[in-house]
Amino acid sequence: MYGAERWILSLIKYLDKSKVCSLVGAIVDGSLDEAPLCEESRKLGFKSVTFKTEGRYSFNSVISLRKFIKENEIDIVHSHGYKTDLTALLATVGLACKIVSTPHGWTKDPDFKLRAYEIMDQFIFPFFDAVVPLSEGLMQTLVHVPGIKRKLTLIINGVDIGEIEELSDISTEVLAFKEQGFFVIGYIGRLVDGKGLDVFISSLSKISHLSWKVLIVGEGPQEKELRCLVEDCGLAESVHFLGFRPDRLALLKGFDAFVLPSRSEGIPRCVMESMAAEVPVIASNIPGCRVLIDGKKTGALFEVDDEEGLSQALQKVLSDDALRDFYKKNAKQFLLENYSAERMAKEYGSLFEGLFSD
């Protein structure tokens, strides 16, 4: 349950239910019983289904999805990610069902195999009825793909602000640190190389004169490497790995600062949630972050992989109460005016209707 999954939940929650009936599907490895996305969608009252596959990819999922589409008379399949894009395309061949893809971003410096998959994804986009990048940056990467221009519709990412505003409790773990006089710095997301967490951890040794604790929320293949780096930097008492947490928003609301040191992003949901929770953001200076954080009014920016720049930003934000308050106020106002989930869902609803207007 990371950014893309929560984005999907926000979309279906705010789509006009008098016009759109949403079902949530996920492709899972045969060894797994359920997908967290499906579990969460059911809690919101939506029907969901899992399609089992063997290993990383199997044609069985295509057959299962095609059968489901026909039996349930599905009008639109809305896919996310290269595996589900390919599955959706193959499953709908010859059917009246429309297919829509939302690219959430590309990997920076991917290995050969992943790069091949991402190129394949862009190659099949012209065969979709609509392709909906969620940021200007992603839009620009796609406009030059042959045969895709007339299929493109830009719908800027949105976040469910109500979910955050309705939450009044702050995690007792965070409160305990704050009561001891510590600043609490947080990160929420996957533990993978592209997130730049190695740079974040290395930068912390440069602010050892301040009283702080870092909470890293999430799971991923880089966790062991990051734990070793924490040990090597002598930060074991100050940096805490919390794993996946369903109460991530209760943790977030108690942070004194949120750090996103990513090397590439679409429009990061975690930054939007921080802005909605009135938590000052320090983010890497990449296109996906710059649309939210300007480095002046809505939060602080530092250059990608710049440990010194990140440590300076951390010191500045943590040492200046007035600056934190300034970022909080301006960031939330900017988010409310430009990035609500209600606005996003309304635009998708219009897109879906338009697919059948002919």
Image: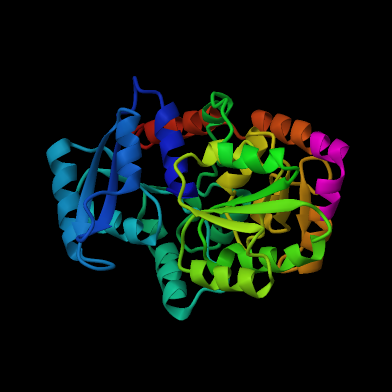
Residue drawn at (52%, 34%) of the image: 344
Magenta highlight range: 315-326
Q: Is residue 305 left or right of residue 157?
A: right
Q: Is residue 319 magenta?
A: yes
At which x and y percent is residue 87?
A: 27, 58
Quarter containing the C terminus: top left
At which x and y percent is residue 111?
A: 48, 78
Residue drawn at (55%, 44%) of the image: 154
Residue drawn at (75%, 43%) of the image: 181
Q: In the image as oriented, which residue stretches furthest toward the front?
A: 180
Quick check: can you spot residue 22?
no
- Name the image colouring: rainbow
Residue drawn at (73%, 36%) of the image: 331
Q: Is residue 261 magenta?
A: no
Q: In the image as oriented, which residue stretches furthest toward the top?
A: 18
Q: Is residue 351 left or right of residue 328?
A: left
Rendering quarter of residue 277:
top right
Rendering quarter of residue 298:
top right
At which x and y percent is residue 97?
A: 25, 43
Q: Is residue 77 left or right of residue 218?
A: left
Is 354 situated above or below 284? Answer: above
Is 160 situated above or below 281? Answer: above
Magenta stretch: helix, strand or loop mostly? helix
